[in-house]
Amino acid sequence: MNRELSLLQFQHRVLEEAEDPDNKLLERVKFVSIVSSNLDEFFMVRVAVMKQKLAAGTQVLSIDGKTVVQQLETSRRGVERLVKQIYECFQLRLVPALADNGIVIADYTALDDRERAAADRYYTETIFPVLTPLAFDLGRPFPHISNLSLNLAIVLKDNDGRTHFARVKVPEALPQLVVIPGSPGRKKAPPPVQKFVWIEQVIAANLKSLFPGLEILESHPFHVTRDAEVAIKELESDDLLESVEEAVWRRRFHNPVRLQTDVSISDSIIEILIENLEVSPEDVHRVQGPLDLTRTRQLASLDRPELRDEPFEPSTPPEFSVHCEEDIFTAIRHKDHLLQHPYHSFQPVEDLLKKAAHDPDVLAIKMTLYRVGRNSPIVQSLLEAIENGKQVAVLVELKARFDEESNIEWARALESEGVHVVYGLVGLKVHCKIALIVRREADGIRRYMHLGTGNYNAATARLYTDFSVFTCNPELGADATDLFNFLTGYSHKADFHRLLVAPVTLRGRFADLIRREMALGSKGRLIFKMNALEDKSMIVLLYEASRAGVRIDLNVRGLCCLRPGMPGVSENITVRSIVGRFLEHSRVYYFGNGGKEEVYLGSADLMPRNLDRRVEILFPVSSPAIVRWLRDVLLEKCLADNKKARIGKPDGTYSFTPSTGIGAVDSQAWFLRNRTQATD
């Protein structure tokens, strides 16, 4: 199955959540914002890469045998269908439903005199001071249009009858939906009506204030998406940090890959935009409705609790609570622990690093940071550790896409305080999630670890489903030490005791584990939960396992290039995708092994980039109790989900017939209600 088409299929599944009337209304609006943002990224990354390949004359075919030209064309058609469905969902279903609930998105022209006066007053007091009209003529070049910016293209006529072109950027820092105050003294039954109008309509209605003495002939919004793939010349760089900084700066000036406009825009304006933005006519996308629906997230945050999912507070297991008599190291020495985020709090992870920073017996802390986020308690603990005389070594992956600038800031902050900072490896992204704490104890040196499937980011830990494992297993500790030596020094380590490490051992060892199930024939059992399945050799191996009689259930949230249910090829394979309140992010790989079952967790999907071009780890679950919980609770509930799960078909599409009533199983809702510990 083609990667790009499979990725677009995932966007359809996200859109289905916006269309699902069983979801709360503002949550449905949130999914419109999410799918629109995902589509922006599809252009910034996937379409951009295809265009780069086309420009370079790349002849390599895709996994399903398509040329770059064919992939661009099929992707274009797929995007057109998806965008049409997004706007139908938003305008024909969500906007009327919002109005029924007192949230009205009005057109500026439909406002009455009082409302129009209020909008114009807001324009004069708040919007007008921020605006900068930019002319385009012989003396003034066409202005730079920043990535994902919303703009107005304006045609004007002066007193001499000459026409001019100008551009006004819609300010991103202001609310994109302008609130229209209600009538004074009007009494409405709760909830009161909230009326909004898009900011670009308010600006367009007041353009005369920006161009006094000129006639406004026409104005139309347009939205530009640029190539955001950062090419970093590592081998030619003496300083990777400076190289990444420069690449991020250059990203702002990369070629546009999409130009969105409204359907009523004139051909003359389109010609100006095409010529000066240097896009092809095929890159122009006209839509019937407001541009950039990612802005609907403003509505999703309205204070209307009855229209949103019920809030929840992650639970903290007793042994990690502040009231526990044992400290966190004692709890980990007693047994391994597994936390399931966001149902369980991320606080114990932060507490472990905080405790390590201040514990006099801790000698060293080593960890990897991929997407940390702003105001990170984790980084603060590392800074406190260095102040307290600990040896601290941190690998900050500067090349984490769209988080480069944040990671550069953290790297500099850590380095300035004396932390040993490594910026990643040449040719490889470091994507593994691991923290190693070396502690001096009465019986010698002991190594404590946090191993995760998600980033060290408290904000995303409330939005993504991920796992945290706390352990002091000696074999895993020895592997963790070897891994950090590989990351921070020169090491050609080619074997590890328990960890599967990419790009060294993961691919080969994982293939061996699949072949072990194949040898069992119909007694073989594989259950994989991941974000993406793209690697061709792994797909072929799974086909071979299916033909050998192995029963295989795949839970793949995003793109999946394997076709399930094909007679004689994959009839023993099922594929499902769960899209729900939280982003399914954890990776779980279960191998039946004839009753001696093994489970691996980690950060790696079955994609070429994860297996060959990243430093990744999959770590075995040592605790039999945790293995049983993962098998009997986590994987069982995911496989039983018939409310949020979509079932993959051989043609790459997915069927979605959500169950209702007594037999309906929503796995995420179940885990919210039943936050049992994996070690119970």
Image (spheres, rainbow, N blue to C red):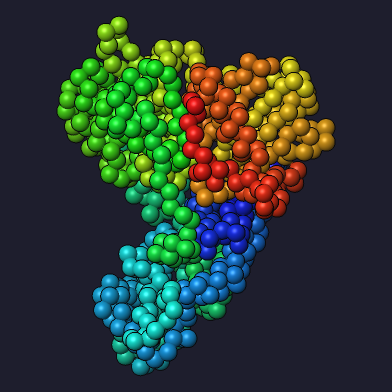
Camera-side residue: 439 or 53? 439
Where residue 316 appears, x then y in whole percent?
A: 39, 36
- Residue 488 visible to an observer of this rendering: no
**Residue at the outermost right position:** 567
- Residue 358 visible to an observer of this rendering: yes
Q: Quadrant of the N terminus?
A: top right
The answer to whether 272 appears left or right of 607 in the picture is left
Identify the residue shown where x is 75% and y is 43%. Answer: 650
* Res 124 → quadrant: bottom left
Camera-side residue: 248 or 518? 518
Identify the residue shown where x is 79% and y is 34%. Answer: 571
**Residue at the outermost top position:** 443
Where residue 292 appears, x then y in whole percent?
A: 48, 65
Where residue 491 appears, x then y in whole percent?
A: 40, 15
The answer to whether 322 appears left or right of 493 in the picture is left
Camera-side residue: 409 or 426? 409
The answer to whether 148 appears left or right of 1 in the picture is left
Identify the residue shown where x is 35% and y is 80%. Answer: 181
Image: 492 above or below 316: above
Where residue 558 appears, x then y in whole percent?
A: 59, 44
Image: 575 above or below 140: above
Camera-side residue: 455 or 37? 455
The answer to whether 486 appears left or right of 567 in the picture is left
Identify the residue shown where x is 58% and y is 32%. Answer: 633
* Res 403 → quadrant: top left
Number of numbered discs overlaid on the protein picture: 0
* Res 639 → quadrant: top right
